[in-house]
Amino acid sequence: MFYIGGETIPGVEIIARTQRSHPLDPLSAAEIAVAVTTVKAAASTPEVRDGMRFVEIALLEPEKNVVVLADAYFFPPFQPSLLPGNRNALIIPTKLPPRRAKLVVYNRQTNETSIWIVEFSEVHADSDTRGGHHRGGKLISSEVVIPDVQPAMDAMEFVECEATVKGHPPFIEAMRKRGIDDMDLVTVDPWCAGYYSDADAPSRRIAKPLVFCRTESDNPIENGYARPVEGIHIIVDMQNNTVIEFEDRKLVPLPPSDHLRNYTSGETRGGVDRSDVKPLVINQPQGPSFHTIENAVCLHEEDHGILWKHRDWRTGLAEVRRSRRLTVSFVCTIANYEYGFYWHFYQDGKIEAEVKLTGILSVGALMPGEQRKYGTTIAPSLYAPVHQHFFVTRMDMAVDCKPNEAYNQVVEVNVNAECAGPNNMHNNAFYAEEKLLKSELQAMRDCHPSSARHWIAKFLRRAGFLKHNLWVTSYKNDEMYPGGEFPNQNPRINEGLSTWVKQDRSLEETNIVLWYVFGVTHVPRLEDWPVMPVEHIGFMLKIVFLSYIAPDNVTALNIGTHIVFVLLQPDGFFDCSPAIDVPLGSEVHTKKAERPRRFK
């Protein structure tokens, strides 16, 4: 017998579980420590070991068949029919393949980047925590990346770059020329270099910093990005922590102190907060049924208005249901900017994704009376350039998939007007026409109308993935980054998607991956200062059940676009609304506000 959720499941034997981590669980702290220890132990010399900087430590995702087995292992009897050759009985595997981690390591001693694969041994039997204590790791492979590449900068390099610049005597003198004697007022943000010429070649690890200045060193709530320092050109060698290029090209006055520059409570609008917002009280008499941890993915439920509603005007029958959604989200702060990523799971089968953009605009200083064609003046002597944000979603689809039995396919749907004739007497008929995308080159698709493509620009030689809105590839576990794994200072053209699809692999009866490219061109407004209200961008997907394409019930993915959010919704997947059985909501306890009397 097997017990799950307080219920007894007959016919399922209890198995002593020695495997504690699901194949898709994020790496635990214990696994990360084991991976780092394993790689350091394999270093050829103490000098190599001491020079290692761990840029990335991530789970190496397994094949889908391993995930299917794990789902049955961790959540029996979850989808038992997914197990190969097991349509009539439940089988729980006694052991899953060992988990693996991929590590990207930058070595400051040699200026080399290497990729390491570490396999974890099983967790201790007495560990009750998934991803618990590991005995150790085994090095599976390691290679120095050829040709030269530069990985992403880590947080420590941000600190080191600022210290290097602020300690450079010509920089100190340039600050004095601008009336800045207190270096504690100065902020230096290192920006990764692109590739414009051989001077940016990845043989050196370089950064091109931006400089800002506060007005008060002892004011922690001041906006640190409101006063850019212009006219200074700096290039820093991040391997050796030295300034290799410095020019004081032009003396641009610092923007004046602006009373609208700060954004904390009591500091906005001259220190006057609005007073007409009434308090909102959420009461949990028995305390919360959750606990919080810092710096983590957020998981919570939200009320989302009406799920469905109808009133029969003849009989007076009225039914309505509230919608609530499960939201999984996280926010990335990158210097002055924030990106929020939100996935919403609904009771009617929809899956919606949002990208929220907020934070502080990247700004530049203006000379007195100067106007910039390429930006918006948002405060005295301060402008924000017109800029762009691009996102690529990689969706390794597994919708109702059964190994070796059915596959996801991609179908393009176009709505066409019917030709005039006997079947369209009033010229108002139109229909949806479906087209199966069978190969990678055929599946490079663009949105319509064509104005949706106005953000494509000449930098496509390095960002080739922007040439099309939709790409579909046959799954390959090392094809993870649409612009190539190491874009910083990369002189090579069209790495990533543009190169992979040249193979024109078949998309029929295979494991497919969808790549959707979306973005926004932001023309800054006065209302975006000092902190930008959230901007929403995204696209739309529709999951469609197409029983006529293949006898094994192929699930197709219908691609559409939307400027606000990402939405995956079932279409023919269920036989009726999956939200129809949501119970009537209980009475909501609220208190009505008293209306002020206008007349006695």
Image (cartoon, rainbow, N blue to C red):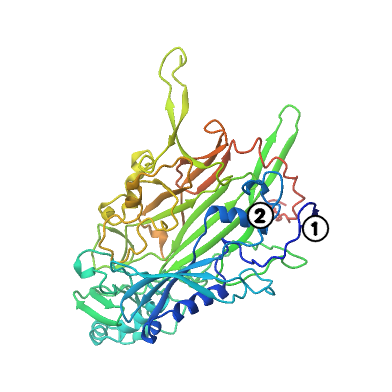
Q: Which residue occupies the foreground of this view, 141 or 595? A: 141
Residue type indicated by callout 2: Ala
Q: Secondary structure at mark 1?
A: loop
Image quadrant occupied by the N terminus: bottom right
* Residue 470 versus residue 74 in the image, above or below: above
User: Position of 555 compared to 481: left or right?
Assistant: right
Residue type indicated by callout 1: Gly
Q: Which residue is mark 2?
A: 72
Q: Position of residue 219 (x, y in %)?
A: 45, 81
* Residue 591 versus residue 403 in the image, above or below: below
Q: Residue furthest front?
A: 85
The residue depicted at 38 percent of the width and 77 percent of the height is: 158
The answer to whether residue 533 is seen in the rendering is no
- Residue 5 found in image quarter: bottom right
User: Position of 432 compared to 25: left or right?
Assistant: left
For the residues labelled 1 and 2, say whether their Cβ atoms are less than 8 Å apart: no
Q: Which residue occupies the foreground of this view, 228 or 594? A: 228
How far is the residue under mark 1 from the one under mark 2?
18 Å
Q: Position of residue 408 (x, y in %)?
A: 51, 42
Tally of marks: 2
Of the numbered discs 1 and 2, the one sitting upstream in the chain is: 1
Badge 1: residue crowd in 10 Å (few <14, some 14–19, many ≥20): few
User: Position of 567 compared to 146: left or right?
Assistant: right
Q: Which residue is mark 1?
A: 6
Q: Position of residue 464 (x, y in %)?
A: 31, 52
The residue depicted at 70 percent of the width and 34 percent of the height is: 311
Q: Position of residue 470 (x, y in %)?
A: 40, 45
- Residue 29 found in image quarter: bottom right
* Residue 1 versus residue 184 in the image, above or below: above
Which disc is residue 31 wearing? Answer: none
User: Position of 190 compared to 598: left or right?
Assistant: left
Q: Which residue occupies the foreground of this view, 246 or 277? A: 246
